[in-house]
Amino acid sequence: MDCWSSSVPLDDEFEKLVIRMNPPRVTVDSTSSRTATLIKVDSANKRGSLLEVVQVLTDMNLIVRRAYISSDGEWFMDVFHVTNQNGEKCLQEDAADRIQQSLGPRARSFRSLRSSVGVQAAAEHTAIELTGRDRPGLLSEVFAVLADLKCNVVAAEVWTHNSRMASVVYITDEERGLSIDNPDRLAKIKQLLLYVLKGDIDKKSANTAVSVGSTHKERRLHQLMYADRDYDIYDGDYEPTSDRSKLLVTVDDCIDKGYTVVNLRCPDRPKLLFDTVCTLTDMQYVVYHGTVIAEGPEACQEYYIRHVDGCPISSEAERQRVIHCLEAAIRRRSSEGIKLELCGDDRIGLLSDVTRIFRENGLSVNRAEVTTRGSQAMNVFYVTDVSGNEVKSETIEAVRKEIGLTILRVKDDVCSKSPSQESGKFSFCDLFRSGSEKFLYNLGLMKSCS
């Protein structure tokens, strides 16, 4: 029997036609719940729809307290209970429009997202993507090289996990304030940064390369870390037993319905849903049904998934890989160490000077978020000592005095604190199961998988 295989461009055009015939419907309901705003999404189903919606909610700084997901068939139907960062109802009137735009026919196709690593020129800035082995002082060296090359860093995000580092850095030309598009200059930037990343111990896996195409910054960081295999577990890895006990990921079979069931429980934090959905999507899995409960210190997520080829997970090796990748995705954004917030007038070489002072005082940067708003620099650093331990208060004060007491402040990161251990046998996931019981029963999933 002959088999017909459609091309990707034809698939894209068919998807656009279906979306035009069945445009997405998004409703925002602030009256049904006393504590949250309900965002309901009905749309023609296409690959990546769930991630696109979650990505919009994340970019709007909304916290998902509950979510009910169903996309088994030709239609995508989700309900999200969201609040703002302060736990209040969402008052952003453009939420529905932004979600509809992300799902509409003019939205960027899921298949067009490139997964290469490198230097990418945009209209206002040039994006540099870096991966390599983490070490004390690495970030200081990267910013020093960029300052020496007359590059101004306007934004950046840096993640470290399992002795690996990934970063996306946005730069402009120091004199013109515009993106850098000269091929020879970009090649020199790439060469010198690669030299820094390799150091003396990372001759093979450090990477910078020229890239075309773009994607969401935080999703790109997940892709970079995943490509760098930061999820690999070796004997003697740094993660302590107490850390593992706070995070539980299980992957089981749902044979009657032909799904694989992923259950996840860990301390809640902002963007947790984005991190898990992003990872499953980039690993080529499709979420057909799901329930998310994150109304307390602990978050519980349950997904019914299949691979994009329609098959559930069939081997123990694949099962363990999914577990390790989800664990890595959650830990990449963990906020270990003391949170330092730098707010002040932006200037050329500011990051180079600040990170140099960190290095000279024995501080190691585990995660960093760099932003520029107008003439103001607004940067956040999570720091430990070079051994990964908490920094002594006198060291922090010495660093603050050198940089400026009014510029660099110590901030409490409420979301990174671990919840207190509950006594007795009560489990928040018991509430998760009872709360989603009716939902799963209506899908015909609860009886075979409970």
Image (spheres, grey):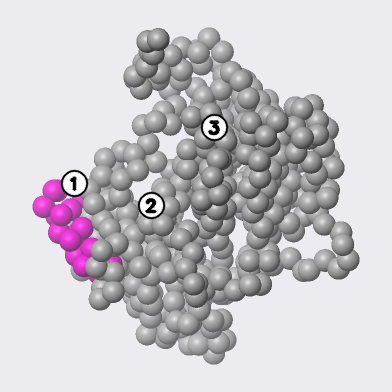
Q: Nearer the viewer, mark 3 or mark 2?
A: 3
> Closer to the N terminus: mark 3 or mark 2?
2
Which SS type dominates the magenta stretch?
helix
Residue 88 horizontal side relative to residue 222, left or right: right
As drawn, which residue projects farthest toward the left?
A: 184
**How busy is the neighbourhood of tag 3: few (under 14 within 10 Å), some, or many (20 plus)?**
few
Task: Give the amino acid type for the residue marked by disc 3 in the picture.
Answer: Cys
Measuring from the top left, give residue 66's x and y in whole percent.
73, 42
> Closer to the N terminus: mark 2 or mark 1?
1
Measuring from the top left, give residue 327's x and y in whole percent.
57, 57
Nearer to the camera, 242 or 109 = 242
Separation (CA) of disc 3 from disc 2: 23 Å
Residue at image mark 1: 181
User: For residue 227, which numbered disc appears in the image?
Assistant: 2
Name which quarter of the figure residue 133 lies in: bottom left
Residue at image mark 3: 311
Kind of element beneath mark 3:
loop
Asked whether residue 151 is in view, the answer is: yes
> Does residue 192 show up magenta in the picture?
yes
Nearer to the camera, 323 or 402 = 323
Asked whether residue 85 is in view, the answer is: no
